[in-house]
Every structure is written in structure tokens, then in C-alpha cells.
Image (cartoon, rainbow, N blue to C red):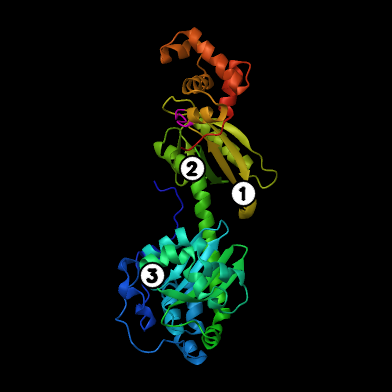
């Protein structure tokens, strides 16, 4: 049973595991790669050319090679977007082009790129993007709507002394030292389109930047759309992972009971079909009385006027303790009525509870185990045989842990332990 919403896979380079875009040729493209000790991190290149350093063509040639229509096609077509960096680099006389996005949590994502392999880009975005001086310089001058030569902001000497160059590029014998970029800042994150050249190719001259600026307004729009789409995907994945980390089941349903989403714990419970299951896409109960309670509770939580939450018990065919389910009305940004079901399987022990009690209250391992047993309704006489000691010994340990937890009675210990949020660990 597949109850999780499917994420449409991007067909960009990182998703397919290989760079689809054409390999960039020209004198700059071979400057560093011929001597690279790790060729797997770069796409293969032709042999070096002894000709003069390459320069970007004029505005007319650039527009002919990479026209506005191609840019807007890349907004909606994944294959066109994947090929765009190579076309942009080739048109600008650059070694490589990268379109990257910084999410609001300051994690980076490579949206599309040329020349580099997925291994190189994964290493870059996960480890080195945060210390990349070009990235910081790009974002410092964002939203100008123009390409900027970063040689003016980060000198070649400063770049070569940077940890980014020394710990990332230099070990790969990558002589990339020149960069031009177009940057954008939005509420959803920040985007950068960067073009790089090696030492032999020379810096981006004013004429090069003028040629690139012909397409800058259109590239800015593309960067905004593609970046904000990536931001929404990123947010959805973070939200899903957050729910999956919880040690409780979360199931979102519509007013008719049809499931919208379930986290991993919720999926596992539905698959067991012990009291709860999916029937034609809707959450259903095996017990008639439980089904009636669930239907009524969902109806109240998704009512158009004054939705109200509630809690119900769902009986289980296995004879285990019933699920105690909280139903909470959901509205929010969806602007349609849904209900959130949260509960845990009482038959599944929280394996991290003892360790968390030790950390929280300074209990010994034995004291923590006794506290957990008290929360499950056991008495000192019931706990003693489990631990192989006399009831008097258990009572002494209870007195010690009660003092550490600030409790006067066993019932207070049990209530305090039960109040701790469940862990998914």
C-alpha cells in the first residue's frame, strides 16, 4: 500500500546521475582538467588549444546562440533547463556555469550546472558553498539585474589564499580563478547564476558583461521561478522528514475521511490493519462503534463553521489496548477543511524513554527503568521480580528518583513520565 504522496523527480543533472549538457570546448575548458588527479569530478574535455584566451561573443552573437525563447522554454522544460548552463557557458566563453539556490535554512542546492559531475557538485553544495568567497560577493550585490565580474570584489590573490580554493579547488588541480555572476534575493531564498573561467582564459571584461546583460532580465525571471519551485520542494521535504522523525502516528484526512498524508509511523499502523486501515483511500475502522466515532469526530473537526477537535478510542481486533486518537482541525494555508489525527501505539515501547529520563533528571539506569515501569502502571511489588530484587529495594530506589524528579508520590512520577513527548529514535 503506497500511502505517501509521490514527489515528482526532477530530470536535471543531479537527478539523472550524469551531466546531460554538452561538454564545453575551447582553450579554457582544458586548462585545469588535463592535470586533474580526480577526473571523475569533471566532465572529459578536448586536448588543450594553444590559441589565445577565449572571449565572449558580442551581444548579437550571444543572443543568436542563446535566445530569449530558449530561456523561457527552460523555465517549464526540465531537459532545456538541464542543458542551459552548458549553452550559457559556451556562449560566454566560460569553462562552466552553475545555477544554484540558497534556501532560507542556508542549505544550498545546485539547480543545474555544466562541466562538473554530480559528485563534484554534491561535495560543493554540502561542504564548500558556505565558504565560497564568490558566492558571498555575489549575494552582497544581489538584485542589480546585471552580471558582475567578481574579480572586482574578490582579488585573485585573496581568492587563491581563501580556504575554499586551498581546501577544495587546489587539491583537484582546478585552476578556476575568474567568475562573473548574476544574483537574486527573495523571501524564499537566494539564487546565483555563476560563470567561471580558468587562469589562461582571463577575467570577464566589460564587453563580456555587456553581452551577458542582454539576457540578464530573462535569466533573473528564470532564476526566480526555478528557485522558488526548489524552495517549495525543499520545504515539503523538511516537513515530511519532521513528521517522520516523530514517535507518534500523524494522519491527515479530508472531511470525507480520505487520507491526504501519513507519516512513517502512521503508514506502518495502517498497513498492520489492526483496528485501522485504508479502504478506497479513506481511513476506516474494523469495529463498527469505532467507525461511527471516527466519522463523527472527523465531521466535527472539518465543519465549515466552528470546527472542533476531540479525542476518541479505536478498538483493535488483536485485543491490544485501543488507539487513543486526538483529532485537531486544520485550516491554514490550504484554505480547505482537513483534520489531523495524532496517536501512538500503546503496545510499542518508547526505547529512548529511559535514556531521556537519565539525561533530564540525572537518574541512574536502574532508577530510569523503575520510573518507566511506574508510568506503565506497575507497583513496587510488580517491579521487584523483573529486577530480581526485594520490594523494599525498589521502594528505596523510588524514593531516590522521586527526590531527583521533584515528586512526592508514585502517581506524580508516572504522570511526569507520561507527559514527556514521544521520540522517534
Secondary structure under the numbered disc 1 in the rendered image: loop
Query: Are circles 3 and 2 on residues that touch, CB within 8 Å?
Result: no
Query: Which residue is tagged 1?
Result: 337
Left or right: 288 in relation to 302: left
Q: Which residue is mark 3?
A: 116
The residue located at (38%, 73%) in the rendering is: 115
Query: Considering only vertical position in the picture, is 320 above or below 22?
Result: above
Kindly identify the residue that appears in the image at 50 percent across and 79 percent down: 71
Between discs 3 and 2, the one toward the N terminus: 3
User: How many angstroms separate mark 1 from mark 2 (CA)?
Assistant: 25 Å
Q: CA distance from mark 3 to mark 2?
A: 34 Å
Circle 1 Cα neighbour tier, 10 Å, few/some/many (<14 / 14–19 / ≥20):
some
Q: Which residues are magenta?
A: 347-352
298, above or below 144, in the image: above
Q: Nearer the viewer, residue 152 or 123?
A: 152
The secondary element bearing badge 2 is classed as helix
Q: Nearer the viewer, mark 3 or mark 2?
A: 3
Residue 296 location in percent, x, y? 59, 37
Q: Earlier in the sequence, mark 3 or mark 1?
A: 3
Image coordinates of residue 74 in percent, x first then y, are: 47, 75
Please name the predominant secondary structure of the magenta segment in the image: loop
The residue sitting at 54% across, 82% down in the picture is 215
Q: Which class describes the residues within 10 Å of circle 2: few (<14), some (14-19), or many (20+)?
A: some
Q: Which of the 4 image quarters holds residue 29?
A: bottom left
- Residue 245, label in figure: 2
Amino acid at each position: 500500500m503506497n500511502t505517501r504522496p509521490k514527489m515528482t523527480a526532477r530530470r536535471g543533472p543531479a537527478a539523472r546521475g550524469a551531466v546531460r549538457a554538452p561538454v564545453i570546448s575551447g582553450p579554457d575548458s582544458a586548462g585545469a582538467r588535463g592535470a586533474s588527479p580526480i577526473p571523475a569530478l569533471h566532465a572529459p574535455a578536448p586536448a588543450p588549444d594553444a590559441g589565445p584566451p577565449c572571449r565572449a561573443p558580442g551581444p548579437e552573437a550571444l543572443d543568436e546562440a542563446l535566445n530569449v525563447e530558449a530561456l523561457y522554454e527552460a523555465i517549464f522544460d526540465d531537459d532545456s533547463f538541464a542543458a542551459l548552463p552548458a549553452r550559457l557557458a559556451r556562449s560566454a566563453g566560460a569553462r562552466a556555469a552553475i545555477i544554484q539556490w540558497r534556501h532560507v535554512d542556508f542549505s544550498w542546492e545546485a539547480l543545474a550546472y555544466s562541466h562538473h559531475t554530480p559528485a563534484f557538485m554534491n561535495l560543493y553544495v554540502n561542504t564548500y558553498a558556505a565558504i565560497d568567497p564568490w558566492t558571498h560577493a555575489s549575494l552582497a550585490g544581489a538584485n542589480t539585474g546585471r552580471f558582475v565580474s567578481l574579480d572586482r570584489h574578490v582579488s585573485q590573490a585573496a581568492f587563491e589564499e581563501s580556504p575554499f580554493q586551498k581546501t577544495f579547488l587546489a587539491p583537484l588541480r582546478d585552476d578556476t580563478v575568474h567568475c562573473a555572476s548574476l544574483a537574486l534575493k527573495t523571501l524564499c531564498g537566494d539564487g546565483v547564476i555563476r560563470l567561471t573561467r580558468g587562469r589562461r582564459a582571463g577575467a570577464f571584461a566589460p564587453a563580456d558583461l555587456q553581452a551577458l546583460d542582454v539576457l540578464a532580465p530573462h535569466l533573473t525571471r528564470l532564476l526566480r521561478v526555478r528557485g522558488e519551485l526548489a524552495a517549495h520542494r525543499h520545504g515539503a521535504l523538511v516537513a515530511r522528514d519532521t513528521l517522520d522523525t516523530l514517535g507518534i502516528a500523524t494522519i491527515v484526512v479530508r472531511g470525507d475521511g480520505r487520507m491526504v498524508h501519513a507519516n512513517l509511523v502512521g503508514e506502518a499502523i495502517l498497513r498492520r490493519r489492526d483496528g485501522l486501515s485504508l479502504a478506497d483511500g479513506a481511513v476506516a475502522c474494523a469495529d463498527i462503534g469505532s467507525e461511527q466515532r471516527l466519522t463523527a469526530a472527523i465531521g466535527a473537526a472539518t465543519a465549515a463553521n466552528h470546527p472542533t477537535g476531540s479525542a476518541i478510542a479505536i478498538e483493535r481486533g488483536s485485543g491490544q489496548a485501543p488507539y487513543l486518537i486526538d483529532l485537531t482541525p486544520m485550516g491554514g494555508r490550504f484554505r480547505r477543511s482537513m483534520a489531523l489525527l495524532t496517536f501512538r501505539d500503546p503496545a510499542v515501547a518508547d526505547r529512548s524513554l529511559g535514556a531521556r529520563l537519565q539525561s533530564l533528571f540525572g537518574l541512574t539506569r536502574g532508577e530510569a527503568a523503575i520510573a518507566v515501569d511506574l508510568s506503565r502502571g506497575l507497583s513496587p511489588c510488580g517491579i521487584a521480580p523483573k529486577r530480581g530484587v526485594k520490594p523494599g529495594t525498589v521502594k528505596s530506589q523510588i524514593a531516590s528518583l522521586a527526590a531527583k524528579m521533584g515528586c512526592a508520590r508514585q502517581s506524580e512520577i508516572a504522570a511526569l513520565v507520561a507527559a514527556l513527548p514521544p521520540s522517534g529514535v
